[in-house]
Amino acid sequence: MDNNKPLHKLFQFLYGPFFYVLDFFMRHYKANRERLAVLMSKKGIASFMQIAAIVLLIIWILTFLFASEESRNILTEELKKSFSELKTFNNK
């Protein structure tokens, strides 16, 4: 049993921090998902989030409509670039 103890300490020294950090992030991810599920189950908050998303979309459309031609081209190229990056990310 004493032979395994140095190996256990070495393993814990080398890989322990990685697993501690992974555990930290997974606990917080799970807790945040549960909080979001509780929030979205409440009708008022779910409606507010939907309205906020629609208002944000309208703001972006207005920004695009009132932008100069050069700015529109830049916005369009950036949007195409974002969609292509998202597409390659989803295909992986």
Image: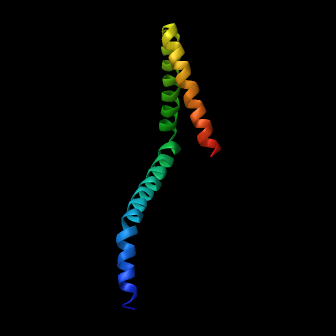
Closest to the observer: 54 or 3? 3
Q: How is the image coloured?
A: rainbow
The reply to whether residue 27 is visible in this rendering is yes
- The answer to whether residue 46 is above or below residue 21 is above
Using residue 78 as the reference point, say whether residue 7 is left or right of it: left
Residue drawn at x 51%, y 19% as measured from the top left: 75
Total marks in image: 0
Q: Quadrant of the N terminus?
A: bottom left
Quadrant assignment, res 11: bottom left
Q: Is residue 62 visible?
A: no
Q: Residue at 48% x, 15% y: name it.
A: 63
| Name of the residue lying farthest toward the bottom | 1
Residue 87, above or below 18: above
Coordinates of residue 71 in the picture (x, y in percent): 48, 13
**Between 74 and 32, which is closer to the camera in this rendering?**
74
Residue at 38% in and 64% down: 20
Residue under the image location 61 percent in, 39 percent down: 88
Place of residue 13 in the rendered image (x, y in percent of width and height, measured from the top left): 34, 71
Q: What is the x, y in percent for residue 83?
A: 59, 31
